[in-house]
Image (cartoon, rainbow, N blue to C red):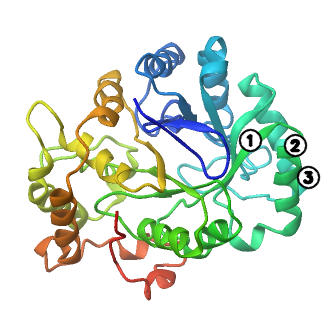
Amino acid sequence: MHYRTLGKSAVEVSEVGFGAWVVGTDWWGDRTREQAIKMVQHAVDQDITFFDTGDVYGHGNSEELLGAALGEVRNEITLGTKIGYDFYNNPQAGHGELPKDCSPEYLRTAFDRSLDRLGVDHVELLQLHNANVGEITPGVLETLDTLREEGRVEAVGLALGPSIGWLAEGEFAVAEEFDAVQTVFNVFEQVPGQHFIDEIREQDTETSLIARVPHSSGLLNEQVTPSTELEEGDHRAYRPDAWYETGWEKVDALRFLERDGERTMGQAAIQWLLSHDEVATVTPTFRTTADIDEWAAASETPPLSPEETERVRGLVEANFHIDRDDGMDSLRSSVGGDDLVDVEKGYAGN
């Protein structure tokens, strides 16, 4: 495993991190508490040191699991959590988004409760969870600064979503020199990740990206194939058929990235992200220990060659030579895609 730092901070993260949303909810398969703890500890055994969670995942359950699983290795790991959703006063309705509260008073209270569940006195990374740009007031920024001054936080970030897009929020975080911006980013869904990389370079800031959904919800690691039957409640079942059909064609076009015995397609997808210096860590959705074994090892697989990255660039610019839409444009932004209309679907250089 290789390691990188977040933004201007000294916080070190493993290039492959563990997204603890998977053990905090049942959205990615049912597992017992014991099985969830064993998954987290198995990740530690594979040299994963960055564990990313959020207070809303399972309404605190994910944080409690991490606290139980990582207590004995606390000094060896990097903890990140997120706050901003008020699940204390609002019941969860299916996969629907809960109301947010980004007032300084609420954020402080929520953070205190997160620390209690994690069983720690500080976290290395604290992220605002899907906060709209208008919610990040001067008072919120002052609160984050104060938490750092108190030694309870070492780095601050902004997690974007839940939909793809959130252009203004990412640009704001770069301009304010947040240490990290977490966003959906993968070979198939490069906007707005590539846009944020361009912003970081143009503004000469040190903001890092945390790339989530690196496998495009199961396409690039081939966990969703033409023969896959998605289980009831699987969030991917809500995607249009065209998304799957175009995705499978794109995967076939990327077969050249596989290297027999050296790099799988799932590992290549991670290496493509890591070819960008601005990407500090990648957080796949681990469902099994076999996933952990394969994707944690991606950090040490052969990096993409200049020829491979250029070939990927050409395919992306040509839309993989597919002349139909994948039906996802309206789902790629918090405002129906309108904020992305004028963003060139470009490819940032390495």
Q: Vertically, is 131 above or below 215?
A: below
Residue 267 in the figure: left or right of residue 245: right
Instruction: Residue 304 in the image: state x and y as whole percent.
Output: 23, 50
Label 3, secondary structure: give it.
helix
Which dot, 1 or 2, sits closer to the camera? Answer: 1
Q: Which residue is mark 1?
A: 154
Give the CA distance from mark 1 to mark 3: 20 Å
Q: Are marks 3 and 2 in contact (CB under 8 Å)?
A: yes
Give the CA distance from mark 1 to mark 2: 18 Å
Q: Quadrant location of the N terminus?
A: top left
Asked whether 47 or 58 is in front, the reply is 47
Q: Earlier in the sequence, mark 1 or mark 3?
A: 3
- For image coordinates 51% across by 82% down, the residue present is 339
Q: Which residue is mark 2?
A: 109
Q: Vertically, is 129 above or below 342?
A: above
Amino acid identity at mark 3: Glu
Q: Which residue is mark 3?
A: 105
Neighbours of disc 2 within 10 Å: few (<14), some (14-19), many (20+): few
Instruction: Residue 156 in the image: state x and y as whole percent.
Output: 71, 50
Residue 58 in the figure: left or right of residue 238: right
Q: Earlier in the sequence, mark 1 or mark 2?
A: 2
